Amino acid sequence: MKTKADLEISDATADDLDAIHTLEVSCFPAPWRRDFFESELQGDSRLHLVARRDGSVVAYVFAMWFFDEMHVNKIAVAESERRKGIADALMDRCLEFARTNGISTVSLEVRQSNSGAQAFYEHLDFEPTYIRPRYYPDGEAAVVMVRHLPW
């Protein structure tokens, strides 16, 4: 699927693991280990997508679903590629997958201090629902945000 000036979105594969993990380390203060991404790729009820520009991974999203709920575990965009609509495109694919598969609720966590991320998800119609104290390894709380998909 081509979106936004030569951006390709496709399923992540084991061949993408090194690029995904490198991006993870550059984007998050407490990154997931590479082996965790590997196990996610092998898990059931998982959606994992990468966005590529000129063949290089510039963003990814990892989500899981159970029954009629989806949870977005991780989304990251390379710093040089931010504010170009890539996160929107990845989230659109997640929401499209949810609708197609009868999923009615999509949730995620975001750092309480990350007002930019909260605003991003609010523009996608996610609503802050509650605070999960001490969620992150450094003790910061998470804001749980939820979007209900209409049928």
Image (tube, helix red, strand yellow):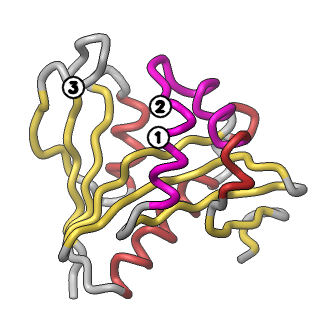
**Residue type at the position of mark 2:** Trp
Q: Is residue 74 above or below residue 47?
A: above
Q: Is residue 3 magenta?
A: no
Q: Which mark is residue 9?
A: none
Q: Which residue is mark 3?
A: 135
Q: Which mark is residue 32?
A: 2
Q: Which mark is residue 36?
A: 1
Percent coordinates x, y for residue 11 in the rendering: 62, 68
Image marks 1 and 2: residues in contact by CB distance under 8 Å: yes
**Residue type at the position of mark 1:** Phe
The rendered magenta stretch, by its main secondary structure, is classed as helix
Which numbered disc, 1 or 2, marks the residue closer to the eye?
Answer: 1
Q: Is residue 135 above or below residue 117?
A: above
Q: What is the crowding at mark 3: few (fewer than 14 residues within 10 Å), some, or many (at least 20)?
A: some
**Quarter of the C terminus within the rendering:** bottom left
User: Label 1 to label 3, Cα distance in Å?
Assistant: 18 Å
**Quarter of the N terminus within the rendering:** bottom right
Position of residue 56 in the picture relative to residue 35 (left or right): right
* Quadrant of the rendered image containing residue 150: bottom left
**Residue at x 77% of width, y 62% of height:** 7
Name the one closer to the observer, 42 or 140: 42
Q: Earlier in the sequence, mark 3 or mark 2?
A: 2
Secondary structure beneath disc 2? loop
Point out the stretch of residues depicted in magenta: 19-42
User: Label 3 to label 2, Cα distance in Å?
Assistant: 14 Å
